[in-house]
Structures are given as C-alpha cells and as structure tokens.
Amino acid sequence: MAKKVARTTDSEPNLAPPVPTPAEVAALAVCARHGNKPSELMEILHELQHQVGYIPEHVLPVLARALNLSRAEVHGVVTFYHDFRREPPGRHVIKICRAEACQSMGTEQLCQHAERKLGAPLGTTSKDGAYSVEAVYCLGNCALSPAILIGDKLYGKVDPKRFDDIVAGLNKETAA
Amino acid sequence: MITIYVPRDAAALSVGADEVAAAIVSEAKKQKKDVKIVRNGSRGMLFLEPLVEVETAKGRVAYGPVAPSDVPALFKAGLLEGKAHKLSHGLTEEIPYFKSQERLTFIRCGITDPLSIEDYRKHGGFEGLTKALAMKGSEIVEQVTTSGLRGRGGAGFPTGIKWKTVLDLKAEQKYIACNADEGDSGTFADRMLMEGDPYCLIEGMTIAAIAVGATQGYIYVRSEYPHAIAILKEAIALATTSNWLGDNIQGSGKNFELHVRTGAGAYICGEETSMLESIEGKRGIVRFKPPIPAIEGLFGKPTIINNVMSLAAVPIIIAKGGEFYRDYGVGRSRGTLAFQIAGNVKQGGLVEKAFGVTTRQLIEDWGGGTATGRPVRAVQIGGPLGAYLPPSKFDVPMDYEEFTKVDAMVGHGGLVVFDDTVDMAKMARFAMEFCAIESCGKCTPCRIGSTRGVEVIDRIIADQDRDKNLELLEDLCVTMADGSLCAMGGLTPMPVMSAVRHFPDDFHKPAPNKFLAEAAE
C-alpha cells in the first residue's frame, strides 16, 4: 500500500520548522562529538553508518552545514568509498573476498554458491531483507582462504558446506 | 596455576579460536583445574591455527589445529602437562617452520599478551625508545640510515633518507603517518603485528616522531581489519596512561599524540598521497608529486609516511644499533622481510627471513607445496600489482634489485600460490578489472586504460583477432605504465604482461567451439 503523503496547500501554509529525522539528530550529535571538524569526516561517516545502518541522502546537507563543507564535498566522500552505503543493508552483511589468494582456493565457486543460496547477486540485498552480499578485495586472511566477513566476525577456509553452516548459525541467532 | 595461550589474532579467530578458548575454560572448570588463559598474537603458523600452547617447565608446548571438540580428549591425554597427543607438535620454539626463521620485527609476536605493557617490556620492549629519548634526532636518523632499512610497503625507498628530509625542514608542525592500509591480496603481516604486538608499532612511530620533531601521528588502518583497529585503540590508550605516549614521555619533555583513522574500503588509499587525502577527510584522490609528502604532506606539513613493517623494524634497530640490522640480508636489501605464504598452499603463514631466501624455499620448504596437492603453476609476488612468476623463476633470491631484473617486485613480501588449474588469461583479466574497480579516476591511463584492458583481454579470450589484440594489449600496458600518476595504473601492467609472457599457452588457446559448448549445456 502506498504511503499517504501529507500535503500543504496554499490556503494552509505549513509554517512549523521541519522536524529533524532521527538520522539527522544522530548526524549532528556525531559531528559535535568530533568537534565539527571537517578533517574527521571519515570517522563521522563510519560512526553514523554504525548507528543508522547507512548514510541517508537527506543527512548530507546536515553534515555539510555542521562541518562547514559544501554538500558536493560530502557527497563526493560518501560516494568515493565502497564502505559507505546509501541504502539500508540487509540484517546480515556478508562480505566475500574475491581477491587473488581466495581465487586460488575457489572463491568464484563460493560466490556463485552464496548468490544461489541467498538469492542475492553480489552487491545486492536479498528480497526478504535478510542478507546483503558483497564482494571485497582482501580480508587479510590469505593463508586460510577463502575468507568471508559477517559484521565484524571473520571466517577462514570457507567452502560451500561451511558457508551453509555459518548462514544456518546466523538464522539461529536471529530467531533466538 | 597453568598458563594456556590461545591466540586472539583475527586469522586464528576465523577458524574458531574463541570457541576453543571457551571449551578449554569449561573443561578446566569441569575437572577443577586452575588455568589461566592468555590471548596472545599469532606465531604465524596459520595452518596450525587455532594453535594452543601450554606453559611447561621445559617451555611452551604447541597443539594445533585444535577444534573445540578436541578439547576433552586433549585434557585426557595430559594437555596441562604438555603430554603427547596426535595434535601435539612438541615445544613451539622447536617446530622447524618457526625455528628456521630470523625474527627481528616479529620477535615478540605470539609470545606476549599483546596489550600487556609489562610483558612487552619483559621481552625487550621500549628499549629502543628509552635509548632514543637520550639521543639527538640526527643520531637516531643516522642509525636508521646505517641499518639500510628500505620502505617495506613495496617501493623500497631508503627510510633514513626520508627521515632526514623531514628532520632538516623547519616547521611548526610535523606528522608521522603510518600506512596500515594493507590492501594487497596475499599480505597480512601488518595485521598480524598490529594485533599481536601493537606496542612495537607505537614504539617505532614514537621514535620516528622524536627523531624528526613531530608531535602528532596517525595510523591509517583499513576498515576490513576491525580486530586490529580495536586492539590499536586500546593499546594507544594504555600506552598513554603509562606515559609511553602523550605529554612529557617518561619525563623527557617530548610529546607525541597518536590517532587511529579508519579507511573505508578503497584500495587506492594505500597509495601514500591518496592516504593523506583520506586522513584529511576527503576523497582518496592521488596527489601530484612533487611536492613529496616529506616536504608537503599531511595538512600541507612535513610528514614521514612509512608502512607498518618499516616502523615496526625501528625499535630493534635503535635498541641493537643500525649495524646489527644491516648484518642480515644481501646486496642492497638489508635486514629481514616478513614473507607471507598464502593462497593455494599447504602450510600458509608468516615467515620472517633475511633477504636472499628464494621463492622455491618459501613455497616448498615452508609452504609444503599446494593445499590441493597439485603442482604449483604460478606464484604472484608483491600483491595484485606484482608479477606472476612461473617455476623457472623460483630460484631468484628475494632482493629488490634481483627481482627488478626479472620484471617483478618483492613488494610487501606476499606470495600467492596457484596450482595447475589456474587460467592465467583469467588472472590477467582480473588484474585489469581490479584496477577499473579501484582506480581513483584522476589520470586517464588508469581510469580508462583498465576498462579498455578488460575488453581487450575479453576479445583475446574469445579469439577475436587474437594476434592484433595481444599487440594492442601490450601497447595499452606501455601507456598505462608510462602515463599513470601512481603505482595503481603504473603497475597493473605487471601482472598482466607477466601472465602473457610466462604463460603464453593460456592466451593462445583454440577458439571456444560454440557448437560444442551449446551441446554441453
């Protein structure tokens, strides 16, 4: 069902200041914690994404104003780095390494298996919103390849069977 | 009380070290045994992780790889007394893989509790810094120059010369920036050191700061290393509390403040000027050089930028003198390098050896051949921008100059092993694809050349005008190598052309037969 959007007409102008969204409130607080210094933008974005899950478009001008940057500069940084997401991620973010060392141990097959199993091609989120699957290039676990990272938890020697066990473990966690 | 070591290194955790530690605690409780668990760094024998060690009268006894389900049987066999079991390897220090190494930078890694300052000092920690605090800046730089230390990030620039440039400049603010954006596949030495012996890096950076008169430092760590980031932040806080960082370090009147900056998944930020932009909170776009960062670096001020491995070598150089370090190695490659044996290899891990060791020794003697048991076909050395070498080149000694002679590079010392199932045309294509994904976009040869490179290789693989396209590929590679602003576009041709040169068969396969392919479907 489509959400109804409240509209103001000319006869009844909406003079109340817009209520800041929770993400905007969070953005201002994070900037303040970093002394509103523009050089801290990377740390600010990381913290904000940690709290909100992603960097919503509408917080960019808020960040820009707080840090005395142009909106274009903030947009430039957010879009340059692979880490910063502009859409909410799935409940579990699964990063699969597809760099050379993991390729030598069959990460291509693992990627295909993961895409099939979770119903989400690399770089997308599954329809039920449970998983975001992403390719990364090196997790620094190259002697125990292939490696995957889920949240902050690293797994080594992941073959399709172990992948399924790990995903089953995630589901159990979510259910509990 | 019996002390048991279970690593907290990310690689060990990735194969269940936390679960093993928990199983040991619960089994000890069940048997009413008094054990103390120390979460150490990794010894670097990653094929044995999780590697559990038990302190005995004779020394530490190793067991690995231990699964949580092995723990009850290990206790039954006499784990706490260091008794035999099929997972036992005897005394850790006597394991040939470990014993045959020359550990200078990794001297404490895996031995101490990474966050215990007391442990660190007991094993020679802060000796270098204590000495440095009583030395003149120029004397410290002289020791580093004498040691022959060259940039361990891959470029191999003499560290002493870089330091001297910054020392000789007058500025109200200077910086030390540590490049911990270890993005190269097949490398994990930086991560292992930051997680296993963080004070060593902190000490190295503080010595650099005292030498050149810097008071602020940054460690730029990639976001793919959450464990390293957490340990570093904790270690910096503890070092500050105990006055090994911060104001008036150990009453010397010298100040040094250290910050951790987190990357955000951009490979290019391992390039030094791109890293500076990123620390400043900007897009990681490469800067023109000159000016070199030593003169105009972070926030426009003189800056020493060194790799983790370069800075972590400094404490022992100052503690034992430049000559001690210089006595290791060959030719103009002095000291040791932490080689990382990775990919399709039976015994992957970290091997710190003096320069001069060969690829064959590393992958056969230490690595034990491929994990799949098939013959080795290629090894990529020095990360995704390094050359693919065939077995005929495996006897070239690890030495910056010797490797240049065979159009390859030692780089950061990472070796990625491939067995005979590898398709080198695919790997060449991947090198171009990776460059297209990770290029910062500032210069044309890298930004556009990489995309055109993928297309040309696709045509070669599909057997369209193969000879002409191979010629075109070579031409494109020359343009990228000569015309790119930094090593990203400049070195991408290295894996590509080495694959073409050393593995021509993969680029001259008969045309795929569409009819047969469809029939097979």
Image (cartoon, coloured by chain):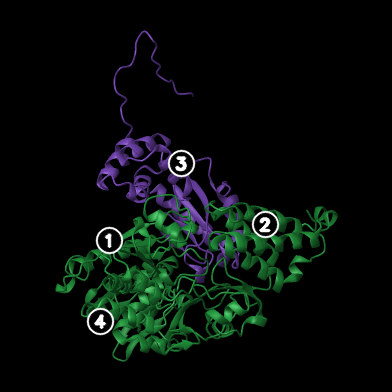
Chain colours: A purple, B green
Q: Image check: B381 left or right of B86?
A: right
- Is B94 rendered above or below residue A158? below
Q: Which numbered disc, 4 or 1, marks the residue closer to the eye?
A: 1
Q: Which amino acid does label 4 sit on?
A: Glu
SS class, disc 1: loop
Q: Earlier in the sequence, mark 4 or mark 1?
A: 4
Report which residue position mark 3 lands on. Answer: A86
Whether tag 2 and tag 4 are in contact, CB under 8 A, the answer is no
SS class, disc 4: helix
Report which residue position mark 1 lands on. Answer: B173
Label 4, label 3: how many angstroms apart (C-alpha)? 48 Å
Whether tag 1 and tag 3 are in contact, CB under 8 A, the answer is no
Report which residue position mark 4 lands on. Answer: B127
Q: What residue type is labelled 1?
A: Gln
Label 1, label 2: how many angstroms apart (C-alpha)? 44 Å
Chain label for disc 4: B
